Image (tube, rainbow, N blue to C red):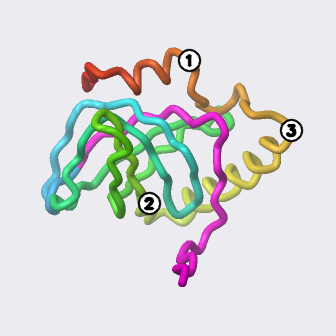
Amino acid sequence: MSQPNKRSSFRIHLQIPLSAMFKIIGIKNKAIETKHSKIMIKDISAGGIRMHTPLNLPTEMSLLLEFTFLLFHQEMKILGVIKRKTMLKPTLYEYGIEFSIADPVLEQQLTSHLIMLYSRLRRNNVLASCSFCSEDDLEDILALQYEIT
């Protein structure tokens, strides 16, 4: 028997992933700040993302993550927590991230941008006004010798 979909937001599956930066800003309710790392967003909704990275992040440490990406020339900075982790291969992990958006204006802005993104992606796979991954981005993200910048 299949599990019902618990998502409350519509999800956009991206043929070409979005390039984003993230950093850890909290561990077990204590503020910390790490350097940024580049990730690729495979799908996105107002409730969260599915991302790929070579970084093996601990799931038991209650990490608070900050994600930064571009939608229609606007930088989106959104907090999130890891809800799911899967090792795709020894050098690539997939994470299910749930957003933690306290600001209703930011949430409405993200939702309206995602509706516009969904509509425009029906005609094009890539939009210049959004941070879609270039070939160089994909190579950087998938590099075996990954360095946090």
Label 1 vs label 2, nearer the camera: 1
For residue 40, above or below residue 94: above
**Spatial CA span between label 2 and label 3:** 28 Å
Quadrant (top left, top right, bottom left, bottom right) of the C terminus: top left
- Residue at the limit of the structure toward the bottom, as seen here: 1
Mark 2 vs 3, N-terminal side: 2
Number of the label disc, if any, that sits on residue 135: 1
Query: The disc labelled 3 sits on which kind of residue?
Result: Arg
For residue 18, above or below residue 114: above
- Residue 111 x, y percent position in the rendering: 65, 58
Task: Please indicate whether residue 58 sits to the left or right of residue 12 in the image.
Answer: left
Using the image as rendered, state which of residue 53 and residue 45 is in the foreground. 53
> Mark 3–mark 1 contact, CB under 8 Å?
no
For residue 57, above or below residue 127: below
Task: Please indicate whether residue 44 sits to the left or right of residue 40 in the image.
Answer: right
Q: Residues within 10 Å of mark 1 (few under 14, many from 20)?
A: few
> Does the magenta-highlighted stretch encompass residue 12?
yes
Q: Quadrant of residue 102?
A: bottom left
Q: Residue at x 63, y 39 (%)?
A: 71
Number of the label disc, if any, that sits on residue 123: 3
Number of the label disc, if any, that sits on residue 99: 2
Query: The disc labelled 2 sits on which kind of residue?
Result: Phe
Mark 3 vs 1, N-terminal side: 3
> Mark 1–mark 2 contact, CB under 8 Å?
no
Label 2 vs label 3, nearer the camera: 3
Q: Quadrant of residue 91?
A: top left
Q: Which residues are magenta?
A: 1-25
